[in-house]
Amino acid sequence: MKKISEEILYRGRWLFLKKDLFVNSSNEEVSWETVGRTDNPLSFGIIAKLNPSGRYVFIKQFRHSINNYVIGLPAGIAGGGAVSGKALEDCILKELAEETGYRGVIKSRSPLLKLNPAVMDGDFLLVSVEIDENDPGNKDLRQELEPEEEIEVILVEKDGIKDFLREEIAKGSAVSSGIWSLACGLDELRLE
């Protein structure tokens, strides 16, 4: 495929929609619509594990696009100069604290990944954070949510993740593909 043109169909405050025109290997023109973020920030998801209990921190967040609550990981976006180094780490830990109230330490991170590349061109980072449950700063938790955010913090034992997700689905909540994939990965890739 070779891209030959692009046309912005809509540009809002946070997102844009564009139509790209390509020529395929058979020399046929094909078009594709994509969505992007206006300032092209780095998105990230946080796998937060409490120690010593070993529980994982999930969130149940209202998502306007589906008019429903979704079970997922604490997550955010890093724009401007916060896309590498200490600025990125500070941004990630600040987002964790804002969404969950927890303070933690980054233990590892993935390489840059693509999030839904069928319709978006955006980079994604998965970050592992350890939270010391015995730290006094993690005792009296206070979220710092923005007006458009409704987030419930949920702690789940590793062995109970899939059952918890199935229960939430049965109650009508949605489950992000990322959190289901994580649960499968923690369970030796069994998808049932």
Image (spheres, grey):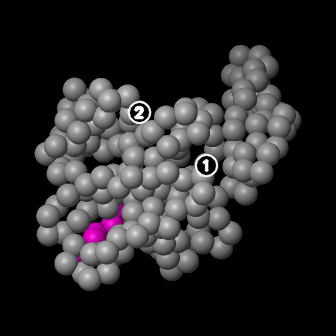
The relative height of residue 177 versus residue 147 in the rendered view (above or below) is: above
Quadrant where the C terminus sits is top left
> Does label 1 or label 2 sit earlier along the sequence?
1
Q: Residue at x 38, y 28 (%)?
A: 172
Question: Visible in this render: residue 1?
Answer: yes
Q: Nearer the viewer, residue 156 or 62?
A: 62
Q: Nearer the viewer, mark 1 or mark 2?
A: 2
Q: Quadrant of residue 67?
A: top right
Screen quadrant of the N terminus: top right
Q: Which residues are magenta?
A: 127-132
Residue beneath the point at 20% across and 58% down:
55
Disc on res. 122: 1
* 191 within the magenta span: no
SS at mark 2 in the image: strand
Residue 174, label in figure: 2
Residue 7 position, x and y percent, is 86, 35
The image position of residue 11, as x and y in percent, is 82, 43
- Magenta stretch mostly in which secondary structure? strand
Number of numbered labels in the structure image? 2
Label 2 sits on what residue type?
A: Ala
In this picture, residue 91 sits left or right of residue 160:
right
Residue drawn at (73%, 57%) of the image: 39
* Residue at the image point whose x is 55% and y is 32% from the top: 66
Q: Nearer the viewer, residue 77 or 137?
A: 137
Quick one: SS at disc 1? Answer: loop
Where is residue 141? Give x, y as percent: 35, 71
The amino acid type, in three-letter code, at marker 1 is Gly
